[in-house]
Amino acid sequence: MTNHLPRGRREVTRRRALTACAVVALCALTAAVPAAAASRAAPTAPKPVPSSAHHLSLPAPTGRYRVGEVDLHLVDRTRPDPWHSARSRRELMVSVFYPAAHTTGRPAAPYMLPAAASHFADVTANGYLDLHIPSGRADWARTVTHVTRSAPVSAGRAGRLPVVLYSPGLGEPRTWGTAMAADLAGRGYAVVTVDHTYESPEVEFPDGSLATLTLPSDADAFLRKALAVRVADTRFVLDRLKELNSGRNPDAEGQPLPDGLAGALNLAEVGMFGHSMGGTAAALAMGADHRITAGIDMDGNLTYLDGSLMPVARHGLDRPLLLMGKDGKTDTGPGWQAFRAHTPGWNRQLILRGSEHASFTDAEALVPQLRLPRCAQTDDIGTIDPATAIRTNEAYVSAYFDHWLRGRSGRLLQGPSPRYPDMLFVR
């Protein structure tokens, strides 16, 4: 298939086949697009979406609870923005997913806000994620999430909620992990997805302004800085969650919080997972902050661009980390092998048979609905049956956090399961 693609596309595909980390995507971005300054544009009307656009839907959460969600605008007044020198405060947007008591009379939570959806369609989907989607094919803002905005929390039945943070890959918005976040919330977790402003492709704030990705001129320096910023963002978000749980509202606009959210979080049991660079950030954040009990790295490298090992690969961890990787050739090998060699405690490495790099994101659910040519779809999400990939990923992610944050059986993590034959264990 690769040989029949245009030369530029062949090079992107070749590099995607040789790597399972957004570090290589970063190299492609810096080679293809000139460096840009940090940007936060004033509110503008999003472009109209063609009436013929596909209305997409995420899979419904499989847990026993309905799912609620609230967006929070968090402002760190102690930290200037590292990407935008004119801004004296670091600002983030996060989404909190949680089990809901009831959803009657509440609006559905949007997948993307209008300005962010417009930018995702125009720039991110093909420019950063290389999804090969024809213009106007999808209405991202109207994607069905099966999540309700600001519904009351079902903490009474679910008990205090273990907290799981999510960091997306490079060039991915936090919304690109919505399906997994919602599924965990339906199983009784509070899941907090984080956009890393000016490194995320688009972040829409409550005033309608849009902050977009700062493209680097020096890929290695960008990578090292971006990971350090993500770790700092993670620690800040955990601090704000502590405030929220004590009854203080951390939202910059002071919007009302869902009934029952304050006091519902179990911040003694915190996990973190992420895709690609987000998986790398999860591992590094664990090394920097012992509040994080357990983590999952979904196809994220643990080496820098020059091949040198990141600290977590050099020294290992004293807490559990699960490595979930794509099938086929990958450059995660040296970093993952070093991490496992230097970690005497619990760790596992899994491979999802027939998967591609994006198979751990919402792409696995949404790309098949776009009616793309077969070669384009397999380039995006591999050859595994999409429903099988989603079901398998959800089973292992939930089993992992159930075991390490709730003390439940970890039998599924002990070895291959006939129920999920596409998940391979690496010894």
Image (spheres, rainbow, N blue to C red):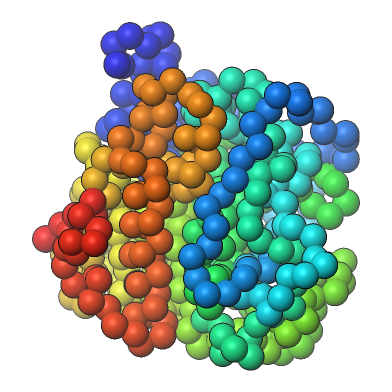
In the rendered view of the protein, which quadrant contains the N terminus?
top left
Q: Is residue 166 above or below residue 172?
A: below
Q: Is residue 255 above or below residue 394?
A: below
Q: Residue furthest front?
A: 104
Observer-nearest residue: 36 or 367?
367
Q: Is residue 199 above or below residue 395?
A: above
Can you give x and y, in whole percent of width and height, for residue 114 in the image? 78, 41
Q: Residue at x 65, y 49 (%)?
A: 144
Observer-nearest residue: 181 or 329?
181
Which quadrant holds residue 19? top left
Can you give x and y, in whole percent of width and height, for residue 416 in the image? 16, 63
Whether residue 385 is visible, yes or no, is yes
Observer-nearest residue: 287 or 254?
254
Can you give x and y, in whole percent of width and height, for residue 125 in the image? 58, 32
Observer-nearest residue: 228 or 339?
339
Q: Residue at x 63, y 53 (%)?
A: 145
Can you give x and y, in whole percent of width and height, for residue 262 in the image? 72, 85
Q: Is residue 358 left or right of residue 209?
A: left
In the rendered view of the protein, which quadrant contains the C terminus?
bottom left
Q: Residue at x 37, y 11 (%)?
A: 5
Q: Is residue 332 left or right of residue 263?
A: left
Which quadrant holds residue 383? top left
Q: Residue furthest left?
A: 427
Whether residue 331 is visible, yes or no, is no
Q: Is residue 219 left or right of residue 244?
A: left
